[in-house]
Amino acid sequence: MRKQIFDVFDKLEMEARDKLNTRFEQLMGGINKDVKSCEAAIGSVDASVLKLKEENELQLFVNVKKDCKTSLEKSKNAVEKIATRAGTENIEFKPDDSIVEWVSKLTSFGQFEHEVSIFTGIFFGKYDLDQKNDTEKENYVFNSLLNLPSGFTVASDWNNKRLKILDKNYSLRSHCDTPGMPYSLCMISPELIAVSLRDEKIIQFVSVDGGGKMKLDKKLKLDEFCRGLAYKENQLYVACGGGEGEIHGQLRVYSLNGSLLRVYKEDIQGKPFFAHPTNVLVNDEGTKFHVLDLKRGVVTITSDGRLVSVYKDTSVASPLGLAMDCR
């Protein structure tokens, strides 16, 4: 691991040196050009000075009127051009302080196998989510589940284009049809949730009353295909792109009125964070984003745009969601 880390730093150092040499050659090319301009101007002035020694008064007048004036104008223009570039030849390198900051926050090189958390699930039961008036009864796809503080659970029924709500006993209470196939859910407040309609490029808000009744509210029209959703402190995090014919995968941040606030798509070296992002979680502090990517696994980045980690379990195929244990 140490060698791999040093190899990365050696590569970064070499790339920085290459950029330095390129910039130096560009500056030296400009300086050499300026030197030649000065030499040409000096030569022109010297030639004009020699012509001032002409004994013929008429010829002397012509020399002063024509040659000397032209030489002075050329010299003045050369000096003015050089003066406009003076002071711009500096080469200044600003190191990325976030590298040291990130390394200093590491607590270990990894984990021992006996330290890895193992979660044990308890099976409570199996509950039906089908309804008599469902148009698609053969291929149910539930992309997302959302637990509300009231005890209700909302499920997104993809093929039937509807949201279904279950009570505390997991009995189907009601449903709400959506203007497209619902992909992901997130809670804005106990009475308001958001659902992404991927193919329609819409974020649809849905109100939920105390009795579990759902009603379509306002919606945001985006300009890209949208999948995973998360909400934190008046900001909506949306996983966009990555599919066939779509933009490259990215995490977008919107205000609740639809204003695009920020886009996370690549690290400081210009390397893409994501390939096909589908779901997103935000930690309690709002400082880290965990993005599920169908091709890369779970990608974790910071709010200031730094890559923290990439984790992929090859035994997991086509994951459809993320959950956090609040740690």
Image: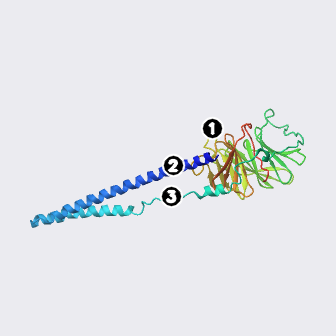
Dot placed on the residue nearer the N-terminal end, 1 or 3: 3
Q: Residue at x 83, y 48 (%)?
A: 153
For the view shown, which residue lies furthest in the left direction? 56
Give percent across and percent down for residue 17: 49, 51
Residue 93 badge: 3
For the view shown, which residue lies furthest in the top direction? 138
Q: Tell me, yes or no, if residue 70 can be seen here.
A: no
Badge 2 is on which residue?
14
Crowding at mark 1 (Cα within 10 Å: few <14, some 14-19, many 20+):
few
Q: Nearer the viewer, residue 38 or 254?
A: 38
Instruction: Give the number of marks.
Output: 3
Give percent across and percent down for residue 310: 68, 46
**Kind of residue indicated by mark 1:** Glu
- The answer to whether the residue labelled 2 contacts the one labelled 1, judged by CB atoms less than 8 Å apart, is no
Tag 1's secondary structure? loop
**Kind of residue indicated by mark 2:** Met
